[in-house]
Amino acid sequence: MINKLMDSLAAAVADVKDGSTVMVGGFGTAGLPNELTDALIAQGARDLTIVNNNAGNGDTGLAALLAAGRVRKIICSFPRQADSHHFDRLYRAGQLELELVPQGNLAERIRAAGAGIGAFFTPTGYGTELAKGKETRTIDGKHYVLEYPIHADVALIKAEVGDRLGNLTYRMTARNFGPIMAAAAKLTVATVHKVVEPGEIDPETVVTPGLYVKRVVKIDRAVTAAGGFKS
Amino acid sequence: MTTTKWTRDQMAARVANEIADGMVVNLGIGLPTLVANHLPADREVLLHSENGVLGMGPAPKAGEEDYDLINAGKQPVTLKAGGCFFHHADSFAMMRGGHLDLCVLGAFQVAANGDLANWHTGAPDAIPAVGGAMDLAIGAKNTWVMMEHVTKGGDSKLVPALTYPVTGLACVSRVITDLAVIDLKDGKATVVDMVDGLSFEQLQAQTGIPLSR
């Protein structure tokens, strides 16, 4: 029998190795799997490369992982926010490497990894600093930049409902990077707020098919607050 | 006659009035966000948000915020009937694939040929952040910019060539400032409208690129 349900967050991240590339879902704080990043802090893996849209808000979740000194490099689109002080400090001190990626390229590079695409030409970023040194091509008169997939060892994502097969649904904009990260990592761990029996999620509405997910942990719903942009 | 600059809300109202019934629109962070408050009630416009929403509604009432439903600026929003959610790769496919009719963005500078600078000042101590700016700039069928006509120092933000780092090349087709509405086409800048009490010559004097009427 397939059973991906796990009893504890600690067990779900117990085997994350030092030096891993870890995708962390979430946009702002919607869909940020703070319970899993807290478990990762307790687990102790270090020298991590983190893939997330942002670079942590406030003092919790991904920001706490940064503050704990576990992250070597971050791949993201929008690190600088009103409450990204841990990132700001580490970056300015030269203790954190940043790979800045336009958000759509970040999403497509993650999607490409999960879909087995070797590389792709995208118009986004052409002629900008973020495409410097990258291969370009003109196709039908339009300019494109060659971008490569981002693979991960681990993806930590927050979903809404799951079953023991790993099928997932999400809640509103907390979906964001979850489905594509789930497919791009060797080990995808999802938290859910509700566990149901196989068949109880309407098959027409499964967002992430279970084969992308290795572990599912049920957690209580916590109140989240948004982290704003610096104006 | 004295010149009164358009307020931020007046600028937003001008943009909103140009948005036709049935259009799919993405409003950038900052000034463009105000456009949503001025959309005429008799037009059905679908607002897209990069974090996976089509059919975004106004801010919720105080006490009804749900932080699983936020916009690109991470503020709580609502969903209109018929709205839907999708993941990030789909959301950016909508942009890059040319499925949005219009995108309205803020800017540091716009060049006469439509080049846009809005993501980074290039200052050596600044932490760069790009978000969806580069995807939005080149993805939508039309990209409009809302910005003050001149900087705090009085320099024109319409320039012959960008001095700030580029966001997208030849992508802006219309600029709405606090002094005028200017269309950019084939390297030519045409004044469509301007504030009361300002002469064309006075506008030209404050504009870093040649204007035509």
Image (spheres, coloured by chain):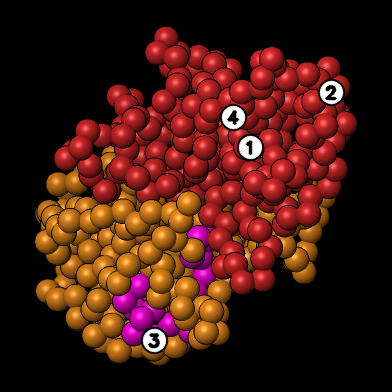
Chain colours: A orange, B red
Discs 2, 1: same chain: yes
Residue A92 is situated, as x and y percent measured from the top left of the image, at: 53, 79
Mark count: 4
Q: Nearer the viewer, mark 3 or mark 2?
A: 2
Q: Position of residue A123 (x, y in %)?
A: 70, 49
| C-alpha separation, residue under disc 1 versus residue under disc 3 | 42 Å
Q: Which labelled disc corresponds to residue B148?
A: 1
Q: Quadrant of residue B160?
A: top right
The span from disc 4 to disc 1 (Cα, nearest Å) is 20 Å
Instruction: Pick whichever of labels 2 and 4 is earlier in the sequence.
Output: 4
Q: Nearer the viewer, mark 2 or mark 1?
A: 2
Element class at badge 2: helix
> Looking at numbered disc 4 in the image, what kind of residue is underneath it?
Leu
Residue B96 appears in view? no
Residue beneath label 2, please?
Answer: B201
N-term-proximal mark, 4 vs 1: 4
